[in-house]
Amino acid sequence: MKNLPIKNISMKKNRRISLSIKIYNLIILLVFCSALFSIVVSYREHVKTTDEIYEALSSNIAETVSNSLNGTRVRTLVNTCTDSEYQKLLARAREENNSDLIKEYLLDKDLLLTYENIKELLRQFTQYMDVQHIFIEFIGDGELYHIVNPADDYLSFGYREDLYGIYLPYSGQNVSIPPMISRFSDNLVCTCFEPVFDSEGNPVAVVGVELNMRSLIREHRRFGLIIIISALALAALAATLGVFFMRRSVTDPLEKLCSQTRDFSDKQEQYSQSDIINLNIHSGDEIEDLYEAIQSMEEKIVRYLDHLIKVTGEEEHARTELNIAAQIQRDMLPQTFPAYPDRDDFDLYASMDPAREVGGDFYDFFLVDDDHLVLIIADVSGKGIPAALFMAIVKSLLKTRASSGESPSKVISRLNDQICKANTTEMFASVWIGSLELSTGILTATNAGHEYPVISRAGKPFELLKDKHNLVMAAMPGVPYSEYRLVLAPGDRLFVYTDGVPEATDPDNKLFGLDRMIEALNSDPDADPERLIRNVTAAIERFVRSAPQFDDTTMLALTYTPDPDSRILLTTKGPA
């Protein structure tokens, strides 16, 4: 059996970027974006937490120092450093660089010990609490007075112009200021201000605390480096595991599916069960569903192609047999023209075009003797092989009967009774049969339910000859059939046909009709029988265009051309 030719539909093999690379890149991108997000969030949370620790510490220190101070004595110090007399003395002491003047002044006011005690208290907090700067200040009349600073000497007691711009914005009006973190040069400083109250609860000054955060900057950098390295390492591990998992569970099965599906589609030979995709995929997900769907599809394709090959083989075998049957049918009909090249008293031509491979129409002509020519055209009911078989039977029996010299009516009557005895299929045939006596031109004919003949008298156009119709042959037994005679003169032409000619249909379901047929016959007044049939065939083809052929079309044309000197002259009025 021949392999059924399969069109090769190949998958695209040249891809710019494979699905695997796209998936791996997506995994890596997502993992490292997640890592970057984690780094940023973790670093900000770490910075926020450490800042809150320093803010709480500075606030606690400031509050502790404020509670440890004697507000009344601080008020006295404030009043002293803001006194105009003290300011003059302070200016002189600074000019002479003599701090003893200030010390004597404080001692005279009984404030030296208070100043020293407060300074020692602040020094202890500076030493043990890692405080960078701690001080007591007072704002009055828009001026900043630096009262106590453990890092300064007595000359610092009083107005400090160099610290004015730094602390004034934060100190407010001797009230509590929340901790804040400020950047100075390359350092961070956490600053907090806490008011000092006198015995009456009035704020008299503020305690300022500055915590050095330089070490915290180094801690932030160290933490950032650690979190970056850790996050990138975890991201690399996660990306590796993700790629491994995706390759094992997704991309590898998909690549195998793609490869075997491509091999199946690229196969040039006949398919078999062994060509169906067979992989060990049991993932329990959509990949397995896809594999099962492809496997099922390929199984159906193989079964379909096997069935198609079988059916195609059977169709090819049936087509071969039909071609042989059609050839046999054609061989049963006379096809050699001119049929009688040694006879010049008549000329004829015939054609049969079946609607299918074989048909039910047929024509025949033969000489019973040198003076009698039998013409037959018939149309068997139905189409295809049954009609062709019935046609072969009818044609053979008709020729056998007509060759005996019986008249057309007797031939049809006896053949009708003979066929009806065994006509279980109840098929029938319309037949026109005529016997032409060549010496006289007498045509004796019987019409068994067939189309009207068309006749053209010498030099005149074709016209229908409405002869007497009888019942179609093989319809019922015992039917009497009549015949008629007409005399053909030299140059007369006869055209007989089956119903496939006038009933040819165009795409709009319009019929070709008898009028168009007669018009085609008259289109060439001097046409011989062959040209007559070809003119009608061409007219039908122009009319039907692309419409499928509905019925067999069969035609037979005759021109009567006897020698006038040898012809026996008779007269007739037409069909009788």
Image: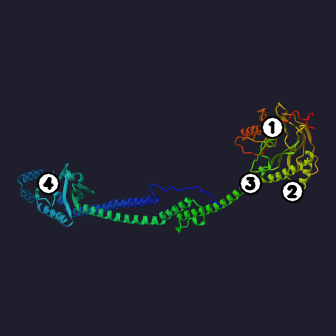
Of labels 3 and 1, earlier in sequence is 3
Q: Nearer the viewer, residue 80 or 228?
A: 228
Q: Amino acid at mark 3?
A: Ile
The CA distance from mark 2 to mark 4 is: 143 Å
Q: Earlier in the sequence, mark 2 or mark 3?
A: 3
Residue that badge 3 annotates: 324
Q: Please, what secondary structure does the residue beneath circle 2 have?
A: loop
Q: Quadrant of the C terminus?
A: top right
Residue marked by disc 2 = 424
Of the two numbered discs 2 and 1 on the same chain, state the one appearing first in sequence.
2
- Labels 2 and 4: the sequence-earlier one: 4
Q: Which mark is residue 158?
A: 4
Position of 364 compared to 316: left or right?
Answer: right
Q: Are marks 3 and 1 in contact (CB under 8 Å)?
A: no
Q: What residue is drawn where x is 62% and y is 62%?
A: 300
Q: CA distance from mark 3 to mark 1?
A: 34 Å
Q: Choose the circle earlier in sequence order: 4 or 3.
A: 4
